[in-house]
Image (tube, grey):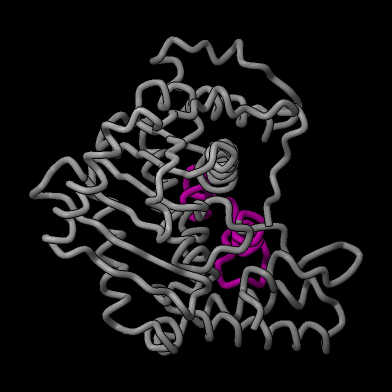
Amino acid sequence: MQTPATLLFDNQIDSKGSLFKNRLELSTLLLKTNGSKYYEDSLEPSVFNGKINSLQSYLSHVIAGTGIRKITPEFKQSLSYLIKERVKKIESAEQIILNLFESIDYYNSIKNSITHKNVHNKVIQIFQEMLHAQKNANYVAIFTNRPIELEADPDKYSLQIRQVTIDSILNYVTEKGIIKYRFNFPSQNIAILFWRKLSYLLVKELHIENSDKIASIDSFLKNREIDTSKIKKTPNEELNLKYKINEFLKIVNDEAWIQVIYLPEPVFVIPHIIFDPNEIKKSEGFIYMTSDSENFQIHKYQHFELLNWRERVWDLIKLNRKSVPIKFSDALEDNIDDFKLNLK
C-alpha cells in the first residue's frame, strides 16, 4: 500500500503534477480555501504563521503514520474538499480520496503500527525509551555502515530518529541544552555524503517548517562574528539558506558539537547508538535494525552489556590513532550554486 506522503506529494495525477507540492502548500490551502473547515479570513500574519505551524505539525504525524494524532472529521472533510477542487473529474477525485484515507488509516492504526508481524508492544516501548534518551542526552555516539540520513525512502521509525536529530541540531542556535553528536562510519565516502545530506536536511527543515529559526541562524552567525550580509546572495531563496547552513555547520563542527569520524574498525556490523558513553550512571545503549516499518527490531543494552561495550569498544576507540575526523569544510560540494530542494 502506498504511503500517504506518496499519494499526496509524489504521484503525478495530471500534467500539473501531484495533488500538492508539500506540507506547506497543503497547510496554506487548508487555511485559505473557502470551503475548508480550517478557513479563516484576514488573519494577522503572526496568527496565520502560528496556525500554519500547528497544521504542519499535525500533518507530519498523520502523514508519517505515527498513530499519535487522531484523524478528525474536520481534517477529512477539508482535505476531501481540496482534492475535489484539484481533481475536477469527480470519479477520479472520489477514488483518490478513498485510497488516501485507506492509506492514512492503515499507517496510523494502532494495530498495524504496534502489533503487526514482528513489531510488538515491547519493541515500541524500547523504541520510545531510545527517543527519550536521545532528547535528554548530552552526548550521542552513533555507529553504522550507512546512516539513516542517506536512505532514500526511510521507514517511519528511522524518520522519527532522524527528526529528533535534526531538531536537536537546530536547537544549537539557542546555545542551551546542547546535545553533542559523534557519527562513526567505516568509509570516508559515507562520511562525506552524510555531511552533505545533513546540510540538505537542515535547509529543507528550515525552508518548510521554521521561518523563526532562520532568523535565529542569522543571530547565531552574528554572535560568532560571521557577517551574514557578506554571505553570497542570490535570487534563489533555498541557495541563500544553504550558504547560511554551511557556515552554521562549519562552526558547530569546529566547536566539536558535531563530529564525523572515519573509523576503520569492525564495529559496524549492527547499527547501534550510545547515549552519554562517558557517564557510567547515565549511559544507555541501543541496537536497532530496520528494513521497513513492519520488521523493526531493537535491543536495549543491559547494564553489564554496556560496561563490557565501554571497556572493549569505546575505550579502545578513543585511543585509536587510525580514527580520522572528516571536517564539514572538506565535504562541501563543488557545484553548490546548483543547489535545489526537492520539496516532496
x 30%, y 44%: residue: 140
Nearer to the camera, 255 or 236: 255
- Residue 177 position, x and y percent, is 25, 37
Check the picture and name the quadrant holding the N terminus: bottom right
> Residue at 43% across / 21% down in the picture?
251
Q: Nearer the viewer, residue 203 or 34?
A: 203
Q: What stretch is highlighted in magenta?
A: 24-52
| Front residue of 109 and 133 | 133
Residue 35 is left or right of residue 85, and the answer is: left
Magenta stretch holds residue 27 = yes
Q: In this view, does 335 lie to the left or right of 173?
A: right
Residue 329: tell me if it is visible: yes
Residue at image location 48% in from the left, 61% down from the top: 159
Question: Which image quarter is the C terminus in?
Answer: bottom right
Total numbered circles:
0
* Image height of 271 relative to 320, above or below: below
Instruction: Pinpoint residue 137: horizontal percent, then vertical percent.
Output: 23, 46
**Res. 8 image quadrant:** bottom right
Please tell me whether residue 294 belongs to the stretch shown in magenta: no
Rendering coords of residue 157 (x, y %): 44, 67
Name the image quarter holding residue 175: top left
Asked whether residue 45 is in view, the answer is: no
Identify the residue at the far right of this view.
Answer: 15
The relative height of residue 73 versus residue 134 in the rendered view (above or below) is: below
| Residue at image location 30% in from the left, 38% down from the top | 317
Give coordinates of residue 103: x percent, y percent: 60, 82
